[in-house]
C-alpha cells in the first residue's frame, strides 16, 4: 500500500518516486500544492476503492496521514 501511495504522489507531483518517503508532506515535496492535493486524494480513492469524508481532506497532507487514513478505511471495510 505504501509503495502505491508513494507512486501516486510522485506521479501527481512529477517527482521521482524515491524522493517520496513516509515523512514526505505538502511542505517538503515540490509540486504538492492544493490542486495536486485534490488529484492525489481522488486518485487514491479510485485506486483503493475508499472514500474520504470532506472534513478529512485538509488533514491528508502527508504520506503518513494518508497511510493512517487508508489503514482505518480498509480495516473498517
Image (spheres, rainbow, N blue to C red):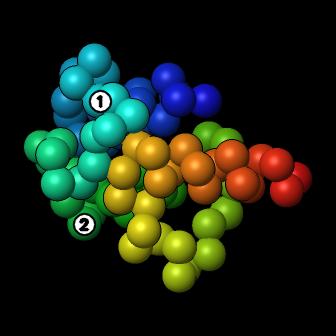
Q: How many marks?
A: 2
| Residue lying at 18% horizontally and 43% vertically, measured from the top left | 29
Q: CA distance from mark 2 to mark 1?
A: 17 Å
Residue 60 position within the rendered picture, expressed as x and y whole percent measured from the top left: 44, 61
Relative placement, left or right, of 13 versus 50 is: left
Nearer to me, 25 or 11? 25
| Disc 2 to disc 1: CB gap under 8 Å | no
Nearer to me, 28 or 43? 28
Q: Residues within 10 Å of mark 2 (few under 14, many from 20)?
A: few
Q: Secondary structure at mark 2?
A: helix
Q: Residues within 10 Å of mark 1 (few under 14, many from 20)?
A: many
Residue 64, by quadrant, is: top left
> Vertically, is 30 above or below 76?
above
Residue under label 1, please give it.
20
Residue 72 position within the rendered picture, expressed as x and y whole percent measured from the top left: 72, 54
Residue under label 2, please give it.
34
Q: Secondary structure at mark 1?
A: loop
| Residue lying at 19% horizontally and 59% vertically, measured from the top left | 33
The quadrant of the rendering that contains the N terminus is top right
| Residue lying at 85% horizontally and 56% vertically, measured from the top left | 76
Amino acid at each position: 500500500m505504501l509503495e502505491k501511495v508513494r507512486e501516486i504522489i510522485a506521479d501527481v507531483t512529477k517527482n521521482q518516486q524515491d524522493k517520496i518517503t513516509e515523512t514526505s508532506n505538502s511542505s517538503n515535496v515540490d509540486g504538492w500544492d492544493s490542486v495536486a492535493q485534490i488529484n492525489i486524494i481522488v486518485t487514491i480513492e479510485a485506486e483503493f476503492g475508499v472514500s474520504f469524508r470532506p472534513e478529512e481532506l485538509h488533514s491528508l497532507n502527508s504520506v503518513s496521514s494518508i497511510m493512517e487514513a487508508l489503514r482505518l478505511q480498509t480495516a473498517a471495510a
